[in-house]
Amino acid sequence: MEAEAEAEAEAEDDGESDVSDFSMLLANFDFASPNVEDSHSVNWLRVALILVSMVGDAVGAFNMLSSNFYYYNSGKHLTKFFSAGLVVVDEVFDLGIIVPTKAWIRYA
């Protein structure tokens, strides 16, 4: 019994953590921000494809407003149009509204 008490005292003296210290689990994680670059480069292909989808959503919303059953589809097209517009503005002007984050960092 004295040997166990001495081993515990020795472990505390060495600075080793006990079971209640969970910092050992975080030792291998890198919490740095992903995709950090010093200069901003615009992915123009992505911007062009988003603009094409925005045109399609605008046409779809306009066509749905002329039908008798327009509530769901026109709302869907208008929502996609405005959210894609926000993505394009954020991409081109580098506002930092939308920050791409890897899932294991986002939900950690």
Image (cartoon, grey):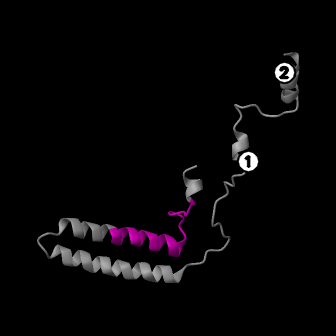
Rendered view: 83 above or below 22: below
Q: Is residue 91 magenta?
A: yes
Q: Nearer the viewer, mark 1 or mark 2?
A: 2
Left or right: where 100 falls relative to 49: right
Q: Quadrant of residue 100?
A: bottom right
Furthest residue toward left: 68
Residue 4 at x, y = what percent?
A: 84, 21
Residue at x 24%, y 74% (from the top left corner): 61
Instruction: Choose top left, top right, bottom left or bottom right for residue 48.
Output: bottom left
Rendering coords of residue 79 (x, y %)? 32, 67
The disc label shown at residue 43, or none: none
Instruction: Characterize the local packing of mark 2: few (<14), some (14-19) or many (20 or more) Cα atoms within 10 angstroms.
Output: few
| Residue bearing the label numbered 2 | 4
- Disc 1 is placed on an element classified as loop
Which of the two residues, 90 or 3, is positioned nearer the viewer here? 3
Q: Disc number at residue 27? A: 1
Q: Is residue 100 magenta?
A: yes
What residue do we see at 71% from left, 40% from top? 23
Residue 104 position within the rendered picture, expressed as x and y whole percent measured from the top left:
58, 55
Q: Are marks 1 and 2 in contact (CB under 8 Å)?
A: no
Q: Which residues are magenta?
A: 80-102
Q: Viewer-proximal residue, 35 or 29?
A: 29
